[in-house]
Image (spheres, grey):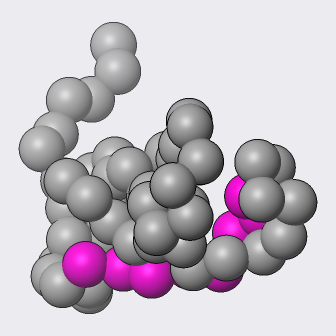
């Protein structure tokens, strides 16, 4: 049987910061995981936004 443990790794949603300001419809979001123990604060990553067609900063929302 597979071992079930709570662990420190959680799924987080990253949302584009520039897309909100542009006023265009839709949104750019990515789902990733992070280690809650090593990075307790919200993470920021540079990811590709297909709507704006460029790399932008994505921040954790939940």
Regarding residue 21, the answer to whether it shows in the image is yes
The residue at the far right in this view is 53
Q: Overall secondary structure of the magenta stretch?
A: strand
Residue 3 percent across, percent down from the top left? 27, 29
| Residue 42 position by quadrant | bottom left
Q: Which residues are magenta?
A: 42-49
| Residue 57 position by quadrant | bottom right
- Which residue sits at x=26%, y=59%? 61
| Residue 46 position by quadrant | bottom right
20 and 46: which one is in front?
Answer: 20
- Which residue sits at x=36%, y=79%? 43
Residue 23 percent across, percent down from the top left? 51, 55
Regarding residue 32, the answer to whether it shows in the image is no
44 and 22: which one is in front?
Answer: 22
Reply yes or no: does residue 39 show up in magenta. no
Q: Is residue 8 left or right of residue 19?
A: left
- Which residue sits at x=20%, y=71%? 36
Q: Is residue 62 left or right of residue 20?
A: left
- Which residue sits at x=26%, y=86%? 38
54 and 10: which one is in front?
Answer: 54
The quadrant the N terminus occupies is: top left
Q: Is residue 41 left or right of residue 59?
A: left
Residue 39 percent across, percent down from the top left? 26, 84
Q: Is residue 50 left or right of residue 58?
A: right
């Amino acid at each position: 049987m597979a071992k079930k443990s709570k662990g420190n790794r959680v799924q987080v949603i990253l949302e584009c910061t520039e897309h909100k300001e542009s006023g265009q419809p839709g949104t750019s979001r990515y789902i990733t995981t992070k280690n809650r123990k090593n990075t307790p604060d919200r993470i920021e990553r540079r990811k590709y936004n297909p709507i704006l067609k460029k790399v932008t900063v994505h921040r954790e929302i939940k």
